[in-house]
Amino acid sequence: MPGSIILLGGDPGIGKSTLVLQAAASMDVPVLYVSGEESAQQIKLRADRLGVQSESLMVLAETELNTILATIQKSSPGLVIIDSIQTTYDDSLDNAPGSVTQLRECTSKLMDATKQGT
């Protein structure tokens, strides 16, 4: 559903990132995959290992929210994957990444961006 947010949860190492990478490559829309835990090179190595190829898959290794939002606005993807929200932070807040305040505020701003289509 356009404008919606889905939270995919599970224990570390069960394959959440692998699953979303494979799903992203099969989409018919441009996808922005934002990773806060792996470099773009690490994601490329995993994609190569899995045989995942897509011309419409963009990768951004970033954790700062405003940079992520600017990239979303600039690239206008049809789908954005944030892997993972607990590493994302808003530098205008004093709280540490992963804190309840950071999670709430970053999620809220990402939800606002999806509603605005940016």
Image: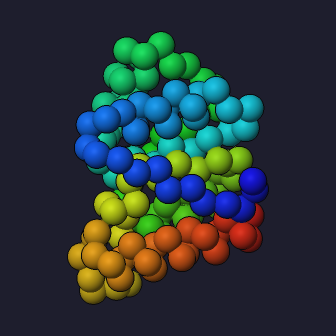
Q: Taking the image as drawn, is residue 107 in sight? A: yes
Residue at image position (52%, 48%) is 81
Residue at image position (49%, 71%) is 107
Residue 83 horizontal side relative to residue 87, left or right: right
Q: Is residue 85 above or below residue 39?
A: below
Residue 7 horizontal side relative to residue 27, left or right: left
Q: Is residue 34 above or below residue 59?
A: below
Q: Taking the image as drawn, is residue 118 in sight? A: no
* Whole-percent x, y for residue 63 in the image: 36, 59
Q: Is residue 99 above or below residue 25?
A: below
On the rendered image, what quadrant is the C terminus found in?
bottom right
Residue 22 horizontal side relative to residue 114, left or right: left
Residue at image position (71%, 47%) is 78
* Whole-percent x, y for residue 101 in the image: 35, 82
Residue 76 horizontal side relative to residue 72, left or right: right
Residue at image position (73%, 38%) is 29
Q: Quadrant of residue 45?
A: top left
* Whole-percent x, y for residue 28 in the image: 74, 32
Q: Quadrant of residue 50?
A: top left
Of residues 77 and 85, the one drawn nearer to the viewer in this rendering: 85
Of residues 29 and 7, the one drawn nearer to the viewer in this rendering: 7
